Image (cartoon, grey):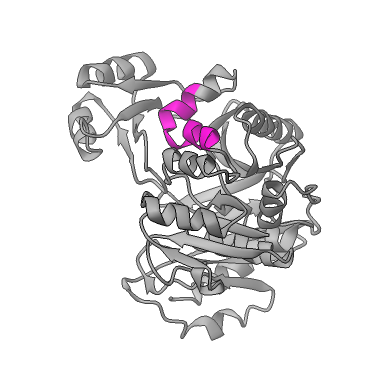
Amino acid sequence: MTVGILGGGQLARMSAYAAFRFGCRVAVFERTANSPAAQLTPMTLVAEWNDERALRQFASMVDVVTLENEFIDASILSRLESFGKPVYPSSRTVALIQDKFVQKTTLSQAGLPVAPFRHIVSAQDAESFGQTFGYPFVFKARQGGYDGYGNRTVQSAADISDAMTQLGFPNKDIYAEAFVDFTRELAVMVARNRLGELKTYPVVETVQENHICKIVKAPAGISEHVRNTASTLAKAAIEYIDGVGVFGVELFERRDGTVIINELAPRPHNSGHYTIEATTTSQFENHIRAILTYPLGNTEMIVPAAVMVNVLGKRNAPLSLDTLHDAVECRNAKIHIYGKADSRIGRKLGHITVIGRSIDACLNEALLADSKLTL
């Protein structure tokens, strides 16, 4: 069995490790050479994803296809499906997610709670939205946004024109979304196979730094009601879009105690990295199980607490591991370095997980290890 992965970053790398455990071969199709996942396998194809000849070659190499990000156009997945290759998540599912306006519309049609939103075709549309839902609100690019890229906060009507221009309007489609007054950002990983078997991971709290996930606390310190609501919404969303694989569901706990969905990711997710050490079955193993139509593994935590801290680039330079020795002196810290060649400020270069008896103790050690790293 050969698993084909579109994309070669850290999510593909960690998924490949999981596939190897089942005796699978892994083929990686990435646009650049020496990607983190390609370092693990000789079955590597380097070309643009829309290269027809390369797509056919990739299809001939693999038995099943998955992807590591939602920026691979659904039409490319559809083309692979037309070659007779199963693709999970399917082109239809990815098409519902990768355009964020379509995603919001789909969730709303499913009766799931999301922030008020509106497609924007003019500055007048945006002014009307602000008058209806108040300021601040957020402009979002319909496609391609991540880690804060593709978002602009609008504090008043005077900001509208500049914010639209910064997002590339009118050449790029945007929409407006009401600002959410939240107390916590939450996330739930959902695994679902082709037979409809579904499992959720514990609800976690995520903490952002400059719009990038920096810390994940598992489990989240929330009420049972909020926990159940978040889990129920996450399940319903993935079932509605007929998702197969592992999905990240990001949510907000609002100040009034209600929970709404922020957005979906059709792949393993940063908020689930802690599962490698802290749960019976990691998100990456369950992703492979799901796309191979294997029974899903247990998703319960095997420790009382876990904290994951992202290792972000602190300089623009070739990657250096000179400080790794200092970080591994933190004996409980599980350090994962992704094999990227270059460091950039804010770039995800690795992560650190600490498991233990309390969130506070885990957080302190994870942050200490992170402070010793300058990659």
Q: Is 238 colored magenta in this rendering?
A: no
Asked whether, in this view, residue 353 is left or right of residue 60, the answer is: right
| Any part of residue 361 in sight | no
Asked whether, in this view, residue 224 is left or right of residue 309, the answer is: right
Given residues 295 and 341, the one toward you in this image is 295
| Any part of residue 13 in sight | yes
| Residue 147 image offset from top left, x and y in percent | 42, 49
| Residue 167 image offset from top left, x and y in percent | 25, 38
Q: Quadrant of residue 27?
A: bottom right
Q: Please, is residue 58 above or below residue 181 in the view? A: below
Give the main secondary structure, helix, strand or loop, of the magenta stretch. Answer: helix
Q: Is 96 colored magenta in this rendering?
A: yes
Q: Quadrant of the N terminus?
A: bottom right
Q: Quadrant of residue 87?
A: top right
| Residue 327 image offset from top left, x and y in percent | 56, 79
Residue placed at 55% from the left, 34% from the top? Answer: 93
Q: Please, is residue 150 above or below residue 278 in the view? A: above
- State the count of labels: 0
Q: Quadrant of the C terminus?
A: bottom left
Q: Quadrant of residue 253?
A: top right
Task: Give, as a single range, the part of the protein colored magenta.
Answer: 91-105
Given residues 170 and 373, the one toward you in this image is 170
Given residues 273 and 160, the one toward you in this image is 273
Asked whether, in this view, residue 281 is left or right of residue 269, the answer is: right
Residue placed at 65% from the left, 72% from the top? Answer: 333
Q: Please, is residue 57 above or below residue 75 in the view? A: below
| Residue 155 image offset from top left, x and y in percent | 29, 31
